[in-house]
């Protein structure tokens, strides 16, 4: 039974084409160039390296350069969001139809998450936001982040649905026993760590219904042999 739905924020609750992550990437490069005095090429190389090595660029900067993380988070999320995303009544209705606990699970800051949810008009559906600080900066795809969110919401991984645009961030959840949903239009083929694929997050209700129907069919199969004489 799914009791909690863990939604990634950026590029999951709104489409990649909104261009917010592209703006964040530009601001991160500006931060690296100005704070660490790097050329544009050096800044991009370091950003990619830290993202690969530490899960987020920020974690690499925190460990290797002892940056002020609050200032970094403010700097890279300083984006006019309403130029990129609007109220989404379809998502509002989809979330309203689901009885499960809904949680935002993001490598970004709580402040950014709150602004995105407000811009989409869906903040009232979410029971809580688990951000990069809540997981002690050991963010996705570090296994510690997935264990931490289960502790915080007091729901075991087997009862969590993990919704993400990035397969890399689904794998640890899957290995803990979560059910996984990959969101986005540019994903092809099958992956053993992906249970469901959605073009758009607005289809999340259909995934929940499929899971419930499968559980019902499973329960009937278990009952059937015992009911025979
Ligand atoms: Mg994302």
Image (cartoon, grey):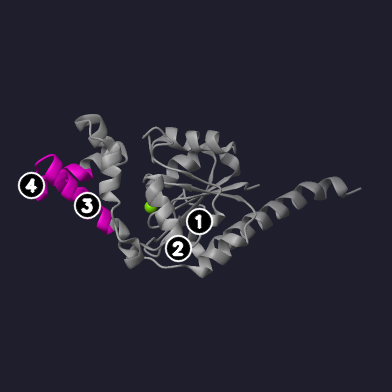
Between disc 1 and disc 4, whose residue precedes?
4
**Tag 3 residue:** 27
Give the distance between the C-alpha atoms of the residues marked 4 and 3, in whole angstroms.
Answer: 14 Å
Please tell me the numbered disc located at residue 123: 1
Residue contact at pointers 1 and 4, CB within 8 angstroms: no
| Residue 41 picture location, percent across and down | 10, 49
Q: Residues within 10 Å of mark 4 (few under 14, many from 20)?
A: some
- Specify the quadrant of the image occupied by residue 169: top left
Between disc 1 and disc 3, whose residue precedes?
3
**Tag 2 residue:** 120
Give the distance between the C-alpha atoms of the residues marked 3 and 2, in whole angstroms.
Answer: 22 Å
**Numbered-mark total:** 4
Does residue 12 show up?
A: no
Q: Is residue 178 left or right of residue 76?
A: right
Q: Which residues are magenta?
A: 22-48
Look at discs 4 and 3 and give the one toward the viewer.
Answer: 3
Look at discs 1 and 3 and give the one toward the viewer.
Answer: 1
Between disc 4 and disc 3, whose residue precedes?
3
Between disc 3 and disc 2, whose residue precedes?
3
């Amino acid at each position: 039974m799914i009791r909690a739905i863990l939604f990634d924020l950026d590029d999951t609750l709104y489409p990649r084409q909104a261009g917010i992550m592209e703006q964040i990437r530009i601001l991160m490069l500006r931060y690296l160039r100005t704070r660490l005095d790097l050329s544009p090429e050096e800044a991009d190389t370091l950003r990619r390296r830290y993202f690969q090595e530490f899960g987020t660029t920020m974690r690499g900067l925190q460990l290797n350069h002892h940056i002020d993380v609050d200032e970094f988070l403010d700097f890279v999320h300083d984006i006019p969001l309403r130029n990129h995303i609007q109220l989404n009544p379809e998502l509002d209705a989809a979330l309203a139809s689901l009885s499960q606990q809904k949680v935002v699970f993001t490598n970004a800051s709580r402040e950014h998450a709150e602004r995105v949810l407000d811009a989409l008009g869906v903040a009232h559906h979410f029971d809580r936001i688990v951000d990069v600080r809540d997981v002690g900066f050991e963010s996705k795809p570090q296994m510690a982040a997935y264990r931490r969110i289960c502790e915080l919401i007091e729901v075991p991984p087997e009862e969590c649905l993990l919704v993400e645009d990035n397969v890399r961030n689904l794998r640890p959840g899957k290995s803990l026993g979560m059910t996984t949903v990959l969101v986005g239009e540019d994903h092809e083929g099958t992956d053993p760590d992906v249970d469901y694929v959605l073009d758009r997050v607005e289809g999340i209700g259909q995934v929940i219904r499929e899971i419930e129907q499968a559980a019902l069919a499973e329960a009937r199969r278990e009952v059937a042999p015992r009911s025979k004489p």
